[in-house]
Amino acid sequence: MAEKGLPTPGYPGLLRMVARISGNLSCSKPPPPQNEESIIKNLDDCDDALIVLLNERAKAIEQLWSVRGPEEGIPSAALSAPTLERLRKTNEMVNGPLPDSAIRGIFQEVSKVCARLRHSVAYLGPPATFSHQAARSRFGVNSCYEQCDRISDIFYHVEKGTTDYGVAPVENSTEGAISQTLDLLANSDDVIEVVAEVCLDIQHNLLSRADISRIQRVYSHPQALAQCRQWLQTHVPGATINSEASTARAAQIASEALPEEGIAAVSSTLASELYDIPIRAAGIQDLTSNMTRFVVIRKNNPENPEQISTTPTGDDKTMLVLSTADRVGALHDVLNTLQQQSINLSRIESRPCRSKAWEYIFFVDLHGHRKEPHIAAALETLKSHCSHIRVLGSFPFVRTAQAIKTA
């Protein structure tokens, strides 16, 4: 086969593989007798062909982003259902040795690697926090991540444009809302938009170099400690409980301690792997249903802050922050407006107004997208019942938590 004039390394191997497959000599069929050297040559050709095709796929992804632009949707490293089905059908026709689960895993990793070409994401660090895992589940393992010490730093990076996106915890199913995140959303004016949500099924573990019977001190984030309070009282009743900035920081402390010091951490399986510290007890949260919801934020278009970056999917959520007028029945009028449009509320929560003592603002999550006519009509009516109202964002409704124990 002539291979002259091919400018890119790898193309000869690709052409040989194409010829081989076209000649019904693919690895999906029993190969003719070959010596070891020819088999190794075929493997090398496969590798060269994959490198060429993977880079071509990456170029196509970049072209697609350029055509669609940033307003056409919020990125996710997850493959779509139609793409997964197409891959399944192709794998079925190829009839090779790889199962569908292997093909899904390979292409999911390819998608995650390609995500790094575009996205930078701020999260609450250090590495191995649940915020880190939430960010990775949305954007992929290989996106560019900016570790932040405080939730406010996540908002700072997004507002200043040093990262494209931020992922911040907003609510836990057992401990309630994350007030700092809510306050930051309320005070971000029109600079920040919520464009997606991630819901994780949280599993806490006890990590330590010491046996459980010898544990004297336990470190973790206050919410993690609260979610494991009963287990800790039962199994390590004599240990002192110490708060840390994050579950991952607690794991770092425990990993640096000697066994005789009796130091433990409540943290994740990923932290156990990252900091090389044994899990002494798994799944120690008091409630089996322990979920945390995270919001994905990005900076609004400064030239057009009213531009809506998401499109309706048919199953969406809209987040609002509002303050009612100072009159009797104002909150009733707000709720009645939503009821008249048959709009279902999934959450309503009050927070003290930071600019005025003894007044409150309300965070409302409702079913539907702000572009849908009945939602748009309700929002227009609410303006007359509220002294202030702002749409924080509309995005697909995540109804089930994602179970994440490792990377």
Image: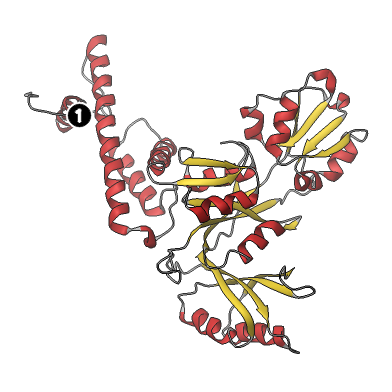
| Three-letter code for the amino acid on which mark 1 is drawn | Leu
Query: Where does label 1 land, which residue?
Result: 14
The answer, for residue 34, to whether it is visible in the render is no
In the depicted structure, whether residue 16 falls above or below residue 245: above
Q: Secondary structure at mark 1?
A: helix
Q: Quadrant of the N terminus?
A: top left
Viewer-proximal residue among 102 and 214: 214
Side of 220 where 116 appears, left or right = left
Q: Residue at x 49, y 52 (%)?
A: 165
How are the colours assigned in the image? secondary structure
Report x, y in % for residue 77. 44, 47
Side of 262 where 156 appears, left or right = left
Viewer-proximal residue among 4 and 320: 320
Name which quarter of the figure residue 382 lies in: bottom right
In the depicted structure, whether residue 350 falls above or below residue 133: below
Report x, y in % for residue 45. 23, 23
Side of 113 where 154 appears, left or right = right
Q: Label 1: how many residues lie within 10 Å, few (<14), some (14-19) or many (20+)? A: many
Report x, y in % for residue 197. 55, 57
Side of 278 where 63 appears, left or right = left
Name which quarter of the figure residue 39 lies in: top left
Q: Residue at x 84, y 27 (%)?
A: 212
Report x, y in % for residue 366. 59, 72
In the depicted structure, whether residue 212 falls above or below residue 330: above
